Image (cartoon, helix red, strand yellow):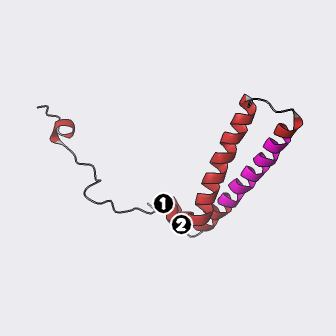
Amino acid sequence: MTIWHERPGADLILRLSGMLLLGCAWLLGLWMAALVRRHAPHEATPLEMLIGMLMFAAGSLGAATLALGKHLFENTQVSERWATKVTSQYYSGQRR
């Protein structure tokens, strides 16, 4: 079975989706600016906070997928110091 991100067009699709997400973040930023300028200085409304959260998420994910593409899913080697050590207490069915 082939892993989906190893298919030939996956890198292109991931990078294009990164551009799309960055475009969405930009549009959300424009919407946020229009909402903030419309009223006198005020506390942030729940809608403004939601827009800010979505803008941050779309910008972060968009930048990562645009920059890395399919390399975002590559396995990395973790040093022994940080590797999880499996103990028999939890995984063998036996308790101490």
Q: Tag 1, which secondary structure?
A: helix
Residue 71 shown left or right of residue 44 in the figure: left
Quadrant assignment, res 53: top right
Residue extending farthest front: 41
Instruction: Kindly check if marks 2 and 1 are in contact, taking CB atoms under 8 A apart as contact.
Output: no
Q: Looking at this view, is 50 or 33 the one in front?
A: 33
Residue 25 part of the magenta segment: yes
- Whole-percent x, y for residue 6 in the image: 50, 66
Give the distance between the C-alpha atoms of the residues marked 2 and 1, in whole angstroms. Answer: 13 Å
Three-letter amino acid code at disc 2? Arg
Left or right of residue 30: residue 50: left
Instruction: For mark 2, give the secondary structure.
Output: loop
Mark closest to the chain's N terminus, 2 or 1: 2
Reply yes or no: does residue 11 show up in magenta: no
Q: Is residue 62 visible?
A: yes
The C terminus, quarter of image: top left
On the image, the x and y values in percent for residue 9 come to 60, 68
Q: Nearer the viewer, mark 2 or mark 1?
A: 1
